[in-house]
Amino acid sequence: MRISVDTEACTGHALCFGIAPDVFVLDELGYNVTPAGEVAPELEEQARRGALSCPEMAITIEE
Amino acid sequence: MTAVDETPTGDRSPTMDFDVYVHDSMDGSNAAWDALRERCPVVWSPLNGGHWTVAGYDDVATVFRDWETFSSERTDPERSSVSIGAAKMPLLIPEEIDPPRWKPLRRVLAEILSPNAVERLRPRVEHWVTHTIDQFIERGEAELAHDLSVPVPSLVTMEWLGWPAEEAASAASVFHDMAKFPGGTPEHAAGAARFQWLMGEVSKQLVARRNHPRDDALTAIARYEVDGELLPQEIAEAIVFMTIGGGVDTTTALTSAALVHLGLHPGDRQRLIDDPGLIDSATEEFLRYYPPARTHARTVTTDTEFGGCPMHAGDRVLVSEVAANRDPAAFPDPDSFDLERFPNRHVSFGVGIHRCPGSHLARLEFKTSIREVLRRLPDFVLDVDGVVEYPNWSVIGGWGSIPVTFTPGPRS
């Protein structure tokens, strides 16, 4: 699984981090700055739920 | 607040006489928005100065995100650009300002209300929730709007700002008092008078912090610099005003909604007691089902077609969070309250650049309040006949009275 974040679309709700703290990285203001990349198999479910929680639909998952 | 002036419609169609200001109960408001969304998701109403209404989830999200076409910028010096209505409203910053000026002004609040900054407030939120419940826990009865959902956000917010403690509760409850009583009543007039007093105090406090800084949010705002310059006084005032006006009675309304809900639905209450880990998804469902801010407004900047409708520069647009949150296209079985609903991308904090910057603090206050109520008065019984809703559900929905009885407990 691969994730990427549209940092222009992120407005800092920080819900992804609440659900998937082991996957997503926030900056000091709470905006998602996670680099695009592969997700470890044990974190895939967290990543999927974190992406689904985003009100801005700013997180893309490629299975 | 009612101002049902007919405005010429020109080529604007479809049209419907939709008067958002007649919504005098939650159920009535929900039903009116559901009916409008099903019949005409985008429609022109000639009432209240004339405005479009946007009710479907995708359209509401699009309007919120497209700030270039649907501006929040203040156009009338005395009247809000982000709500439809005749009442005079002081400027709210950064809500009523768009890029490029928006960015540094939003950053002021983004810094002092970031997830990390809010996490540092956790002990203070827990302190005020405990202190507030201590005031009534031995009595075995309470009016939970007055005794809990009003004071907690007031005390937390005003302490965070750095307000004098003895005035904190009364200063911040101004908005609740004005929402609780209909315009024209002496109680509403008293609230409006205190509103004027509060504005003067905000101004004085900011001047004081400029010269005598402390470790508080008022100081952070008073001494914030953009390109080496302090913020103009009226901008700093508008930012402080945003935190009180935007952050206090909205959190009050959400807490009240949950208390009423848990009083009416013992099954949901028991599930939250048995499994406190449900509070995160439950919080999002309370937000979806009971959005404190029911509607917002925007102004069209350029002639455009939206939802098949011809919109003109200068047209006002009423955007409905409540209608979006109840759109079956976005939320299966939207009328059912589901503690575990997921995903739950409600728009109760807005979406796009103007989304609520206080959402992290609001969630912390709400979750702490509900957790402690369920721990310390888990058997509370709601006096259903004594529950009083706000008289108007057009802009903010909430409750004026939530009487309960419970087994008395000890102070902490």
Image (spheres, coloured by chain):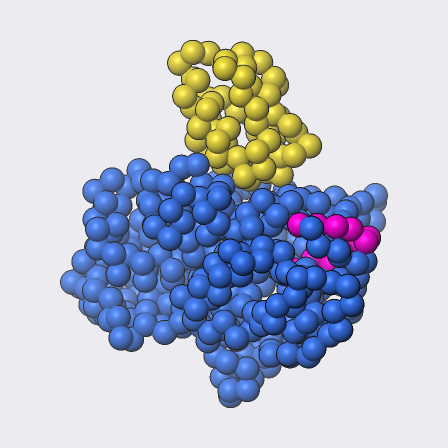
Chain colours: A yellow, B blue
> Which span of residues is magenta-colored?
B297-307
Q: Which of B107 and B301 is in front in this view?
A: B301
Q: Where is residue B6 in the image (x, y as percent from the top left)?
A: 70, 77
User: In which quadrant of the rendered image does the C terminus of chain B lie?
Assistant: bottom left
Quadrant in which residue B191 is drawn:
bottom right
Judge whether residue B303 is colored magenta.
Answer: yes
Judge whether residue B260 is colored magenta.
Answer: no
Q: Which of B209 and B172 is in front in this view?
A: B172
Residue displayed at 42% across by 53% down: B289
- Residue A35 appears anywhere in the view: yes
Q: Where is residue B403 in the image (x, y as percent from the top left)?
A: 28, 71
- Residue B158 appears anywhere in the view: no
Give the answer, above or below, for where B362 lies relative to B149: above
Q: Nearer the viewer, residue A30 or B200?
A: A30
Question: Which secondary structure class fits the magenta region best?
Answer: strand
Q: Where is residue B388 in the image (x, y as percent from the top left)?
A: 36, 74
